Image: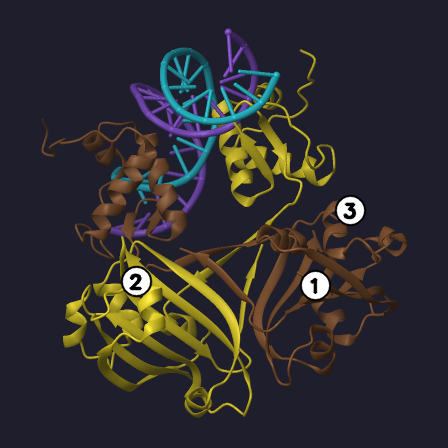
Chain colours: A brown, B yellow, C purple, D cyan
Amino acid sequence: MTAQSKTTEFKTWQAVRDEVHRRIHARIWTPGQVIPTEAELAAEFGCARATVNRALQALAETGLVDRRRKAGTRVATHPTGRATLEIAVIRKEIEGRGQRYGYALLERSETLAPPHLRAVMMLDPDQRLLHLRAIHLADAKPYVIEDRWINTGAVPKALAADFSKLSANEWLLQHAPYTHGDITFSAAVASGADQNALGAPESSALFVIERTTWDRQVAITSVRLAFAPGYRMSTSI
Amino acid sequence: MTAQSKTTEFKTWQAVRDEVHRRIHARIWTPGQVIPTEAELAAEFGCARATVNRALQALAETGLVDRRRKAGTRVATHPTGRATLEIAVIRKEIEGRGQRYGYALLERSETLAPPHLRAVMMLDPDQRLLHLRAIHLADAKPYVIEDRWINTGAVPKALAADFSKLSANEWLLQHAPYTHGDITFSAAVASGADQNALGAPESSALFVIERTTWDRQVAITSVRLAFAPGYRMSTSI
DNA sequence: AAGTGGTCTAGACCACGCG
DNA sequence: GCGTGGTCTAGACCACTTA
């Protein structure tokens, strides 16, 4: 036996991950401290270095440790939590909680992009957009208002689509693939239009999600989702 | 050359991932469709199966594909976006955007747990909690109100800590490790106390984060963060 | 029962970045 | 320069799930 006694074998990367997690949690390795190298841990745990590597990469993804070549692996000083939110199709979200889904298109028009959207979506000044307003219902009660703008330059087929039955939310997923997107969460006082559509009392606080999706450099769509009062978005870390 | 022509070699798992991503994006493999097995792709790409495995696992984590033993790998029908939010220490968040951080403790008391918290934190009826209210400032302007309850049964040292200089937010990270936590995001109308502390106009909409952290089965702390009007939480997918 | 993903290994080479 | 993590390989066995 070498300097490091090998008490137990950790053969799977999950077991190694849990053991390292335990040692950090138990303050055997404290925040900021460099932990043994992959090779050393592999020797101690009686497994291949690749297994240790897999385990430490998983921990790095959660932010529990910081890894840098040559510098080694150290316990994060500020265990920055990382919450992962599932952004599902609204219909699925409602059905997923056992409620009946409803949908109605409120408004449809083709117009020039308003200035703030021209900036957000980086559009030409003369680019025309398809503007949709729709409401999604859960058990016949207003759930969320969808206020959406679609770049018809990028998705011309959208002009021919019938959004009175199928929401743009779903149609776009099927017909307009995107490479990435920006999301912003905020709180807003319900505007008059929001109040009406959601049946919300005056000066309610609404949970708002704004999302713009892109195909490479081209903006596909920008949407504002204003949820009925009382909406809560949950996750765990 | 076998049935599958090998035009290009993809030697790194990132390259394989990108190529698979490209084919899905280009509708060469459509939603719901089963894509070739790892072995087949490895043969086509001229790399080891482990490399393909790594690539497909990465895509599975983002939700772009679904993988099941025996059933194979198929393109997800509802590309459920997955937004990852960094939950940093508030001081870091403020300093990170180049603003000056300020902090003040508003209130400190030791009391029995109010009923709703007893439920959330699963506490004994006679468990006493440490209650703290504090405000965090960015460039001397109110940024967020921290309303926190600490389970002194789990973290007795908290009773002796001085929270007038160091926020509980940071003290707990250093002294009370947790294994997991729940987070909820919502919007709320500013209460009278919120209004006062934040200097917010009447009936403002506040962005609220509620978080409870646990060490195994024991609740460590439960906190409500009410952000000043205008706060936006952003990420990308 | 058989096919497919999940993982381990031992060795190798590479790439980054600290000193 | 050189130590550490990052990745690839070829082969093997395992675990799960569906047919």
What secondary structure is marked by label 2? loop
For disc 3, the neighbor class at 10 Å (few under 14, some 14 to 19, many from 20) is few
Q: Mark 1 lies on which chain?
A: A
Amino acid type at image mark 1: Ala
Let me know if marks 2 and 3 both belong to one chain: no
Q: Mark 2 points at which residue?
A: B122
Q: Name the residue under label 3.
A: A175
For disc 1, the neighbor class at 10 Å (few under 14, some 14 to 19, many from 20) is few
Residue A198, x across and y down, in percent: 69, 73
Residue B13, x across and y down, in percent: 52, 33
What secondary structure is marked by label 3? helix
Q: Residue B127 bears which disc, if any?
A: none
The residues bearing labels 2 and 3 have C-alpha atoms spaced at a distance of 47 Å
Q: Do the residues labelled 2 and 3 touch (CB within 8 Å)?
A: no
Q: Residue at 75% of width from left, 59% of height from top? A: A103
Amino acid type at image mark 2: Met
Q: Mark 1 points at which residue?
A: A140
Amino acid type at image mark 3: His
Q: Mark 3 lies on which chain?
A: A
Quadrant including the C terminus of chain A: bottom left
User: Which-is-in-front pick, marks 1 and 2?
Assistant: 1
Horizontal relation, residue B231 to residue B125: left or right = right
